[in-house]
């Protein structure tokens, strides 16, 4: 299984977990205030992609184009020592999911 497959599996697993959580607690605002499910993703995704990511997860959107864009974002992002996010262009990034 390559990195893309691992990330895709993590995204789909998160979608399933969020869907199941929202069945129990259908107040999305309360869910978002209390959940930590998105924390690891917030740390690695740029702000612009993170918002799209959350909306995609909450709405269980599994279209190939959107999922591939999110995977590309995860693979392109490098977290610097000072916790600022930058795009790494010259070498592959080892992200926390693989």
Image (cartoon, grey):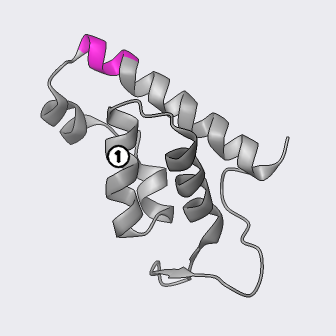
Q: In this view, does 62 lie to the left or right of 58?
A: right
Direction bottom: furthest residue: 90
How far from the left and from the top, in percent, is residue 55? 31, 44
How many discs appear? 1
Look at the magenta stretch and give its main secondary structure.
helix
Q: In the rendered view, would you say 27 is above or below 70?
A: above
Question: To which quarter of the image does residue 71 belong?
Answer: bottom right
Direction right: furthest residue: 1
> What SS does tag 1 mark?
helix
How far from the left and from the top, in percent, is residue 64? 58, 41
Question: To which quarter of the image does residue 81 belong?
Answer: bottom right
Q: According to the image, label 1 marks what residue?
A: 54
Q: In this view, does 87 lie to the left or right of 56?
A: right
Q: Is residue 90 left or right of residue 43?
A: right
Question: Could you tell me which quadrant the N terminus lies in?
Answer: top right
How far from the left and from the top, in percent, is residue 84? 44, 81
Question: To which quarter of the image does residue 90 belong?
Answer: bottom right
Q: Which residue is drawn at the image coordinates 65% and 64% (left, top)?
A: 75
Q: In the rendered view, would you say 86 is above or below 41?
A: below
Between 98 and 11, the one lying in front of the other is 11
Q: Which residue is drawn at the image coordinates 41% and 58% (left, top)?
A: 42
Q: In the rendered view, would you say 32 is above or below 51?
A: above
Q: Which residue is drawn at the image coordinates 67% and 50% (left, top)?
A: 97
In magenta, the rendered stretch is: 20-24
Q: In this view, does 58 lie to the left or right of 78?
A: left
Q: Does 57 appear in magenta?
A: no
Between 83 and 49, the one lying in front of the other is 49
Mark 1 crowdedness (10 Å alpha carbons): few <14, some 14-19, many ≥20:
some
Q: Which residue is drawn at the image coordinates 48% and 52% (left, top)?
A: 40
């Amino acid at each position: 299984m390559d990195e893309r497959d691992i990330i895709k599996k993590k995204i789909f697993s998160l979608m399933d977990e969020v869907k199941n959580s929202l069945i129990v607690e259908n107040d999305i605002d309360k869910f978002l205030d209390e959940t930590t499910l998105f924390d690891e993703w917030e740390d690695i995704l740029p702000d612009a992609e993170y918002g799209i990511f959350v909306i995609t997860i909450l709405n269980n959107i599994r279209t190939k184009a959107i999922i591939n864009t999110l995977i590309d974002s995860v693979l392109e992002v490098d977290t610097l020592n000072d916790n600022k996010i930058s795009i790494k262009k010259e070498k592959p990034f080892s992200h926390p999911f693989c």
